[in-house]
Image (cartoon, rainbow, N blue to C red):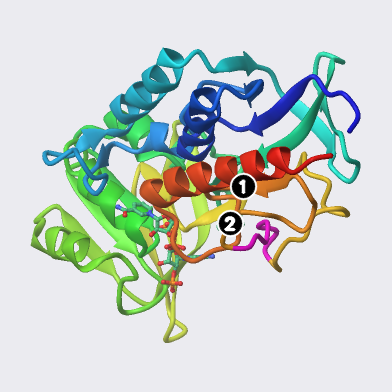
């Protein structure tokens, strides 16, 4: 086997990457975790996590990541804050190209690059981004104190964040394209009981209308063919996620129709020595606990592979 800088390189420092890093550090692998920004991923923009075991009262997303990061730091995992621009994963030794021109090599790689919010793709969405159009209730909610706003989506994220936004806004209209929510029942019960939340069923935003101060109203297309207008100063678009796969060699890696990486149950991709964990994987359940579990599984698979190299 050719020499490499590291036995294992983990790309991405969300719950999957941090857990893979924790296992690698405890296994005393020569391992590196690469993260372009702060560790944490999407959890950092989650106000409240109520379903991560061992936190009976729930935990703030930021605090959960703080604890996960402190945990890997206790075992001295090497971390580097740098953006990966591309990867060559098809050879025995994998090469990662960094923004600063540096190249790093690893015998194994775990991809934990996660996902990002999906857009609705209507007029006004790009133009008014940051001026009333938001994809993060935790980040931007406090700007909408005593204002009327809208949330688009019917999944866990939309409903959880609509409930969170009741702390600030005077009224929240949840706009959903069907007549029933996808969100888990306990969140639905909370949202239906919340006086500040209204629902606009069978409806889609067809345009976001703004003026000098930002978002002013939304054009709504109803399923029955009618249209209407809704006056709001903010719109939170929370309609699911897309894979962070731009840096990945998609000609080498097998992905599903939506660009998420296909793995087996041991987190092995189609390429020997390459694993994927967390939201970047093709799968149904996207939970923090899944991401962490998959990070552990991926690292154990990498260890097994390293143990069988000639
Ligand atoms: P999601 O579960 O995929 O839900 C997306 C929602 O947006 C659906 O209601 C969908 O409508 C709607 N939608 C999709 N595309 C749309 C479009 N172009 N226009 C209008 N509406 C559109 O996504 P998510 O809520 O972001 O959650 C992502 C993952 O994270 C899920 O696996 C979720 O369970 C998980 N998550 C879990 C928690 C938790 O456990 N507390 C919290 C947050 C997220 P339809 O229903 O009609 O398809």
Residue span colored magenta: 258-264
Q: Is residue 207 left or right of residue 217?
A: right
Judging by the rendered image, the residue that carries numbered circle 1 is 301
Q: CA distance from mark 2 to mark 1?
A: 6 Å
Residue 193, how many percent across, how many down? Answer: 8, 61
Q: Quadrant of the C terminus?
A: top right
Question: At 71% across and 38% down in the image, what residue appears?
Answer: 306
Q: Quadrant of residue 67?
A: top left
Residue 35 against residue 52 in the figure, above or below: above
Q: Residues within 10 Å of mark 1 (few under 14, many from 20)?
A: many
Whether 219 is drawn above or below 167: the answer is below
Rendered position, 271 above or below 170: below
Can the viewer see residue 244? no
Is residue 156 left or right of 13 when viewed as pictured? left
Residue at which label 2 appears: 266
* Main SS of residues in magenta: loop
């Amino acid at each position: 086997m050719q020499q490499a800088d590291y036995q294992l390189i983990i790309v991405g420092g969300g719950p999957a990457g941090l857990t893979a890093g924790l296992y690698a550090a405890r296994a005393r692998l020569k391992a590196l975790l690469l993260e372009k920004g702060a560790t944490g991923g999407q959890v950092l923009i989650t106000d409240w996590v109520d379903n991560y075991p061992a936190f009976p009262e729930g935990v703030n997303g930021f605090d959960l990541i703080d604890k996960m990061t402190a945990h890997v730091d206790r075992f001295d995992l090497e971390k580097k804050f740098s953006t990966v621009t591309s990867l060559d994963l098809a050879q025995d030794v994998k090469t990662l190209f960094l923004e600063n021109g540096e190249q790093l090599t690893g015998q194994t790689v775990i991809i934990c690059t996660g996902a990002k919010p999906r857009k609705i793709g209507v007029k006004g969405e790009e133009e008014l981004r940051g001026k009333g159009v938001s994809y993060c209730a935790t980040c931007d909610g406090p700007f909408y104190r005593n204002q009327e706003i809208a949330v688009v989506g019917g999944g866990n994220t939309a409903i959880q964040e609509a409930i969170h936004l009741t702390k600030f806004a005077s009224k929240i209209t949840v706009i959903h394209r069907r007549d029933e929510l996808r969100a888990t029942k306990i969140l639905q019960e909370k949202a239906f009981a919340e006086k500040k939340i209204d629902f606009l069923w069978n409806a889609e935003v067809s345009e976001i209308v703004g003026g000098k101060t930002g978002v002013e109203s939304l054009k709504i297309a109803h399923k029955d063919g009618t249209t209407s207008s809704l006056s709001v100063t903010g719109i939170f678009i929370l309609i699911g996620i897309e894979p962070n796969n731009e840096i990945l060699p998609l000609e080498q890696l097998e992905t599903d129709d939506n660009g998420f990486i296909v793995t087996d149950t041991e987190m092995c991709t189609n390429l020997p020595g390459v694993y994927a964990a967390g939201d970047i994987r093709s799968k149904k359940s996207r939970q923090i606990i899944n991401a962490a579990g998959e990070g552990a599984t991926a690292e154990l698979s990498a260890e097994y592979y390293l143990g069988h190299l000639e």
